[in-house]
Amino acid sequence: MIDRSGADGDSIGRPRGTAGYARAADVLAVQYEEVTFGQVHRDVMGLVPVGPARILDVGAGTGRDAAALAALGHRVVAAEPTAELRGHGQRIHAGSAIEWTDDVLPDLTLRQCPGRFDAVFATAVWMHLDAEERGQAMARIAALLMPGGRFFVNLRHGPVPDGRHMFDVTAAETVELGAVHGLLTILSSERPDLHGRDSVRWSSLVLQARER
């Protein structure tokens, strides 16, 4: 169960992992859209489904990735719990065929858009979950993937920004947790920060469900 008590006005009634995002939504909307889907996911582009697929973008932010995937012909569900970011996304990408929903890990009920997915993206999301939540979330992701489906995880490493609820989550831990839930890691890479922050680096992982 997500703690929605919050320690400050920005997070009261919101999942802890979203702390700070509502207040900074206007600035973040610009920052998110300054880089492209192709730049952020450069190392994993060859593993993104080619044909029309059903894809879930968890913690979709302004919908940058969701819009790019929709433009490739995919059916995309964008789950974003911060209303302010979701509003920016619906404005910026108004012409994109994105199904928006207010939902969040680890529960990720997806009541309005049930079913399984060929791919799930979690970009700069996983490190907002504590260890117990990460276990619950990985189980949920595994259950949402179609046989052979892929989980694309982007992990942030570096100092925690003021007001954020964030943990130091390694790629190795994520690989091991995925294996516990039947997901095989087929790619792992690292890159520097695209916004030029020397103290921040990123890991990209792709975990694949078993073919049945």
Image (cartoon, rainbow, N blue to C red):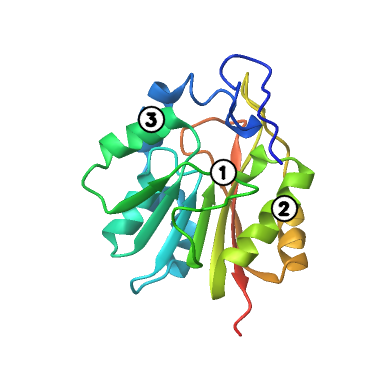
- Of the two numbered discs 2 and 1 on the same chain, state the one appearing first in sequence: 1
Q: Residues within 10 Å of mark 1 (few under 14, many from 20)?
A: many
Find the residue positioned furthest to the front.
111
Q: Quadrant of the C terminus?
A: bottom right
Mark 3 or 1: the one toward you: 1
Spot occupied by residue 89 in the image (x, y as percentages of width and height): 34, 37
- The part of the image, by quadrant, that contains residue 61 is top left
- The part of the image, by quadrant, that contains residue 182 is bottom right
Q: Is residue 39 above or below residue 207?
A: above
The total number of labels drawn is 3
Amino acid carrying mark 2 in the image: Gln
Q: Is residue 158 above or below residue 147?
A: above
**Residue carrying label 2:** 136
Q: Residue 197, labelled with which disc?
A: none
Left or right for 99, reference 132? left
Q: Residues within 10 Å of mark 3 (few under 14, many from 20)?
A: many
Helix, strand, or loop for circle 1? loop
Spot occupied by residue 81 in the image (x, y as percentages of width and height): 50, 37
- Of the two numbered discs 3 and 1 on the same chain, state the one appearing first in sequence: 3
- Of the two numbered discs 3 and 2 on the same chain, state the one appearing first in sequence: 3
- The part of the image, by quadrant, that contains residue 163 is top right
**Residue carrying label 3:** 29
Q: Is residue 148 above or below residue 189?
A: below
**Residue at 56% in and 62% down:** 151
Amino acid carrying mark 3 in the image: Ala
